[in-house]
Structures are given as structure tokens and as C-alpha cells.
Amino acid sequence: MYSINNAVFTYLISDKEPNTPFNNFIKIKSTKFNIYFSQNTQCHYSEDNDYGIYVIGFCIDSNKELERKNIPEYLLKKLKSQNIFAKFLCETDRLAGKFIILIKRYDNLYLVGDATGTLPINYNLKNYFTISSHEKIIADELGYEISNYSIKIRNGSDFSQPMPYNLTMYDNVKILLPGYFLNIKERKPQRFFYPNNIMLSRDQSLALIKNQILTISNITKEYSKYYELICPLTSGSDSRLNFAFLNKEGTNFKCFTFRHKFSSNSAELKIPNRICKEFKIEYEILNDLDVGAEKFNEINKYIGAYQSKYTIDLALTYKSKFHDKALINGDIIDQIGKSLIGNSLPNWTASTYFFKAKLHNCERSILRDIKQHLSSISSRELNKHKFDLFALENRLGRWSSQTNNLYSLMGVNSLNIYNCRKIIFDWMKIPRTLRSANIIHNTINDTINHKLKEYPFNQDSKFEWIKKRPFIFLIATYLKQLLFAKDKEY
């Protein structure tokens, strides 16, 4: 029987007694709110009269100056001494991991997430104040029904794809996007993350990337203090960069590749095996498991309908082999690190229809929500960063966090060594023309382990050349969407 308390990174914040059977709770001082969380979810906090800091999840200091347990106390001191709230939030830029921070300041309560929203903040718009890592938990607590509009949107794509903008499956539940904080009592999100509009030169970019190696190494070391790390490895450049950092720090880690439908001669299996043999790292190919209808239906009680069974199957496959060991994913290094969604396209191509194609959704109604999203990132301060902000807020804040959330319910600790606002903020200063040409990957590999570049990248891919030609990439994006829509009709 599936239990919510076997999940990781799972919580509920509410001003009413919940029906969901969480094992742990903490009362927020001088309020009617409590934080409820599963037995496998952690919460560190510090309180002082009218102030409080509550860190839920896994949070470390990328500067390697603060122990995990001391982070709430450090933030509390900064909160009490800083009159401007936005400046206080800048103190969280150095933090990495998978977490949310609840902030109590006099009678006000605020929530802010990690750099990419890997631990989601879903909140309701009316009735009791109810906030959770999982929208279905809120719906069950408050008796909300799935929205017909959301069903229409969901059926326009594969269930592994995310909802647009801040929509969930319920009209009265929204999700907080990365770069925003939530005023809980007003139920109002507010942006605080504004990228720098001054782009770096190539030489400045190289210097920045080399300086960042220490920060990413610090994060890797801190993660390895609390978890044995597992590195999924393919023939691609992202997982190889993760490998480079784990190997550099001498952490006790292992590698694996999901077999999927790869043949035994596939580079996706052969290259990782060769790399691990040379570096004497334990490696295994995992045969994909099937969670089965009965267990999937049990899990559905917490994830709701319209979720990807395939993702649950992969989480089960991982959990069955590696148990509580932490999986190191590569989501940020592709979406931001090499400008995966926008490539080196000029900013004028960042249209509603382009992003609809990138959502792989053929439902026309979704255009309304994409327009709303684009409107929120089209001000003078943000306009230059449309591609990066859409990647941050949708591909990471919605798609990646959705996958992570399903993994969490299966008890899988999925972490990212680049999930730190300080790192992402700096990467966005590097022109996308340089990032899409792999300047970050190449510079780091050249600096910490040039041998890893000797192995071929993505040999099985027939379309890698398209990414090197931006306007062919643009045409291919629309063509792929057209073929998907045609296939959906049949």
C-alpha cells in the first residue's frame, strides 16, 4: 500500500487541520498556520519574536560557509536587519538544493522557492489558505474538481509535457513560478528576479565560467556529505558535465543508463560504459520497469489524473536499484547552460506560436495562456531575456519540476548541482550565441577534465546539426509541431 509518508520533498502549509495523513508538523509561531510534511522530508527553522525562517527540503550554502542547520538562523539575522524585502531575498541567491523558504515578518507570511522551483509551491485562490508541493493534495483538502479547461489543455499534448504559465489542473489552484515570491495572506505572487541586461564579451564569459567552477564544486561536495550520488550517463554533453564534477570531487558515486529501447550497439550505452571503465566508476544499464496498473492507481490518489505513467515507471526503475541515493539530473545545464529552447535565435522570433510549438501542444486554447506568460516577461527590463525566462519558468519551473515531483512521490531524491540563483543569474549574462555553441560545457571540461571531450557526443542523433543552424532550427521547430498535430488528429 502506497503511503504519502514514503514520499520525499512533500509538504502542506495550511491554517486548517488537514485530512492528508502527514507524520510531522511544525506550528508557525504566533499564527494559525502549521507546516505538515512527510517523514522523509526535512524542515529546519529559526524563530525570534515577530520573525521566523522555515526551510523545507534540502538546502545548502554554495559558498560552503554555512552548515545546513545554521542556514535558517543566518537568514533570520539578515531578515531582521534588512528593511527592504527584495534585498533580503538576494541573500537566498547563494543557496542551492531543492527547497522552499517560508518567511514570517511581523503579521506577514511569504514563500520563496529554490532557483528553478524544483520543489513546487502550489497555492489556492479562495477558502482556507492551503499551499502544497502537490496540487492534488490542495484539491482533496478543499474539495476542488478538475477544470474542464485544464483537461482540454492537457489532452493537447503528451502527459509528460507541462501546463502553460501558472495553470494547474484546478481553476482555484495556481503554481508559483521561479523568480517570484508569494505573499501568502494576499495570495499574490511578485517577481523579484531580474536578469542583468549587460551581456558579457567572450573573454569575460570565459573568466566567469572558470570562476563558477568553485561554486559548482562546493555544491557537489555539500550534496555528497548528505547523500551517495548517482549520475545518469548517456553519450550527451550534459550528463558528462555532471560526471566531470562528481569525478573531480572524488565523491563516492555510481553511474547508470536507462536501457529504454537502445540496441546493444547504441552509443547511448557504449560511450557511458567506456567512460566509466576508463575512470574506474561502477556502471550499470537499468532495464525499464513497469509500475503496474494497481500501484499506479494508488499513486494517482496523490498525483491526480492526467500524469505520465512513463515518468512513474522510470522513478520505480531508479528506486528499485538505488533506493535513497540521490540522482543528479542535468536539466539546468541544458535549458539555460546551452540555451536549449531558444538556441541563438534573435529575440524577435520569441513568439506565442514558437513557444506553443515548444510546449508540444496542439490545443489552440493554450495560446491565451502563453500570451499571458509572454506579457509577464516583455517589460523593458526583461524583454532581452524572453527565451531564458521562458526556459526558466516553464521548461524548468513547470516541466522539470513536474518530473521531479513525480519522482519525489516515488521516494526518489532528484537533485541538480546547478540549482542556484547565483549560477543561473551569471549564465544569463553570457550571450546565447556563445551558450548554444557549448562555451560553458567546453570551458569546464577543458579546465577540469579534458579527457572527457575525447569521447564522441550524441553519435546516434541524426539531428544534432540542426542546432548549429539557428534558422533551420526555427523551421524545424514549427515543422515538428505540425507533424505532431497531424499525428494527434489520427
Image (spheres, rainbow, N blue to C red):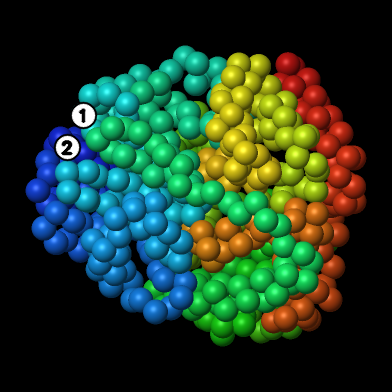
Q: Amino acid at mark 2?
A: Asp
Q: In the picture, residue 141 is in which quadrant? A: top left
Does 94 appear above or below 342?
Answer: below
Q: Amino acid at mark 1?
A: Tyr
Closer-to-camera residue (329/269):
329
Q: In the picture, residue 163 is in which quadrant? A: top right
Indicate the position of residue 348 as horizontal and vertical percent values.
77, 35
Indicate the position of residue 157 as horizontal and vertical percent values.
63, 27
Q: Tell me the residue at 31%/21% (across/down).
A: 144
Q: In the picture, residue 276 is in which quadrant? A: bottom right
Rendered-image quadrant of the C terminus: top right
Q: Of marks 2 and 1, which one's residue comes earlier in the chain?
A: 2
Residue 320 shows up from this direction: no
Give me the C-alpha separation between circle 2 and circle 1: 7 Å
With 198 as the anchor, is 62 left or right in this view?
left
Query: What SS does tag 2 mark?
Result: loop
With 245 as the anchor, is 70 left or right in this view?
left
- Kindly check if marks 2 and 1 are in contact, taking CB atoms under 8 A apart as contact: yes
Residue 389 shows up from this direction: yes
Q: Tell me the residue at 32%/26% (across/down).
A: 125
Q: Give me the disc on residue 15.
A: 2
Query: What SS does tag 1 mark?
Result: loop
Q: Tell me the residue at 42%/36% (across/down).
A: 175
With 168 as the anchor, is 160 left or right in this view?
right
Indicate the position of residue 330 as horizontal and vertical percent values.
61, 59
For label 1, count other residues whose C-alpha is less than 10 Å away and answer few (under 14), some (14-19) or many (20+): few
Residue of label 1: 128
For label 2, count other residues whose C-alpha is less than 10 Å away and answer few (under 14), some (14-19) or many (20+): some
Does 385 appear above or below 67?
Answer: above
Indicate the position of residue 379 as horizontal and vertical percent values.
59, 36
With 67 as the anchor, is 405 left or right in this view?
right
